[in-house]
Amino acid sequence: MSVFRGRYYHTIDEKGRVIFPARLCQVFTEKYDERMVITNWDGCLLVFPYREWTAIEEKVFAQSIIKKEVRAFQRLFMSGAVDCSFNGQRRVLIPPALRDYAKLEKEIVIAGMGRSIEIWNRESFEKELDKSSQNIEDFSDYMADLGI
């Protein structure tokens, strides 16, 4: 099964373009197509293949908008979503609002997360990794439940 995995240190250019690693592009072409949806979440950007995103939309839109937390979630997660695709050089243009949200300026990290990809400001990513590493015991039950 093709999944997005790995950690890639890259840069974003002054126009907001990111060159995606060849390995991640390969997963897109083998399993999906070049279309993707990028949105904001938890200090980073989440990148979903278009097909994965439409499955998320179906689940989210099945919820009642009468619920305050549903509207708040949609306001943050869904309204930030932008359709994107690769150009011929494996580049993706990240819109200014998303770049601002994730504080993407120069040094970035692209992290494969299985069915999705995260794009981080490098400094923010390293802080998150450090926080997770300091709390490694918190993952023990989760890993045990997975049978690892």
Image (cartoon, rainbow, N blue to C red):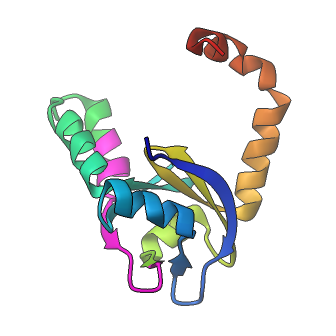
Q: Residue at x 51, y 61 (%)?
A: 24
Please say if 67 is above or below 129.
above
Which quadrant is the N terminus positioned in? top left
Residue 82, given in percent of the width and then of the height, sits at: 32, 66
Left or right placement of residue 15 versus residue 88 in this view:
right
Q: Is residue 22 left or right of residue 68?
A: right
**Residue drawn at 47 percent across, 46 percent down:** 3
Magenta includes 17?
no
Residue at the limit of the structure toward the bottom, as seen here: 14
Q: Position of residue 21 (x, y in %)?
A: 57, 69
> Quick check: can you spot residue 38?
no
Give the vertical position of 115 relative to 14 (above or below).
above
Q: Nearer the viewer, residue 2 or 64?
A: 2
Q: Quadrant of residue 61?
A: top left
When the figure is inspected, residue 140 is found, relative to residue 100, above or below; the finding is above
Residue 78 highlighted magenta (yes or no): yes
Tell me residue 127's x, y (percent).
78, 49
Quadrant assignment, res 60: top left
What segment is highlighted magenta in the picture? 73-91
In what quadrant of the picture does the C terminus appear?
top right
User: Residue at point 15% right, 29% down?
Assistant: 64
